[in-house]
Amino acid sequence: MKSKLLSIIIPAYNVEFFLTKAVTSLSFFLNNEKVEIFIINDGSTDDTELIGHQLSNQFSNITVVTQENMGLSAARNVGLKQVNGTYTYFYDGDDFLNSVYLKDIFMILEQTSVDILSFGYAQVDDDGTELNRHLFKDDSFYISLSKADYIHAIIGGGTDPVAGYLPTKIIRTSLIRTLRFRQMNYEDMPFVFELLENENIHSILYLNRVVYNYVQRKDSITHSITYTNLSDKLLSLWLVNNSLNKMGVSKKVLCLNNERMLIQALWVSSLNIKFVRSRLVASNANRLLRMLFSFSGSTRRISLYLRLKTFYYLIINVLLRFIYFR
């Protein structure tokens, strides 16, 4: 197979109402001999596979791969085994791009030695109405970032110009050739930070425009409250924290991440008590909450409200485990 500049992997599960818009928004990349596109049909029970084949008949560089339903991570891993491109882009089949910037992206990939190309994004509702946008305040068209600045931007919160969300990034394939997605939800952040552990990352660019439109579907996997989702959220927090410690990031970044983990662990505790009532989730959430307060200086930026809320859930999680948690 002739090498390509860019490989695009699109996991697709029951997205018959979204897939055509997602693919056609790739515009400049379609029928482009330097781009290959893989639609990984993950055992869909609707017309996703049929629509995928219709699109592959319409555009010469689309290939449809069908597998039994094994989840997003497995679909991405299958796609990663197929790629021949210098760069790889993991794109979701129910979102869409602002096509006007795709020629710029192609030019950056073709003319620079960038290792990671990130770009701005917007959250939109089902009809495409923009709910919010995430960019650097800098007016520059694109911004060069050190790895330390990049990590800080992901962890630091604020306007979240650099999200942990993987479809806002195009990555040099050689950097992820041996990586695989864990079989879990909320897998993007652990994958991104495992990537960032690689010492061969030297060039990171950020295209400071809204390129990606992230559709907020109420029925999406990550919006449902289940034992699996809450457990995977806690696991994701642990994995990112482990990567940060391996990389030896600054104390400031560790403190920022502690605050992020604290807020997420409190959120998980609240949802678990209200809806799931899992003893294991409560125990794991408390383990994380206790760890966060064991680090010197980790609570300096945390408000009194959050501290009191933490102590409340530390107690409630323990008590309710003995009352009615299963």
Image (cartoon, grey):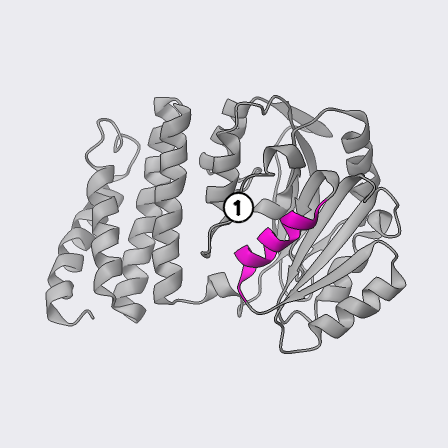
User: What residue do we see at 34% from left, 57% from top?
Assistant: 231
For the question of whether residue 317 can be seen, the reply is yes
Measured from the top left, where is residue 224 in percent x and y? 44, 67
Q: Quadrant of the C terminus?
A: bottom left
- Judge from the rendering whether residue 124 lies leftward or rightward of residue 58; answer left or right: left
Measured from the top left, where is residue 289 in percent x and y? 23, 45
- Judge from the rendering whether residue 180 lies leftward or rightward of residue 121; answer left or right: left
- Above or below, 19 against 233 in this view is below
Residue 268 colored in magenta in the image: no
Q: Main secondary structure of the magenta part?
A: helix
The outermost residue toward the bottom is 46
Which structural element holds mark 1? Answer: loop
For the question of whether residue 117 can be seen, the reply is no
Query: Which span is picked out in magenta?
Result: 70-83
Measured from the top left, where is residue 275 in percent x and y? 31, 70
Query: 207 or 24: which is nearer to us?
Result: 24
> How many numbered badges does the structure rendering display?
1
- Judge from the rendering whether residue 246 lies leftward or rightward of residue 74; answer left or right: left
User: What residue do we see at 58% from left, 52% from top?
Assistant: 77
The residue identified by callout 1 is 180
Dividing the picture into quarters, in which one does residue 145 lie? Answer: top right
- Judge from the rendering whether residue 264 lies leftward or rightward of residue 11; answer left or right: left
Dividing the picture into quarters, in which one does residue 19 lie? Answer: bottom right
- Which residue type does callout 1 highlight? Arg
User: What residue do we see at 56% from left, 39% from top?
Assistant: 178
Crowding around mark 1 (Cα neighbors within 10 Å: few <14, some 14 to 19, many 20+) is some
Q: Quadrant of the N terminus?
A: top right
Measured from the top left, where is residue 115 in percent x and y? 65, 29
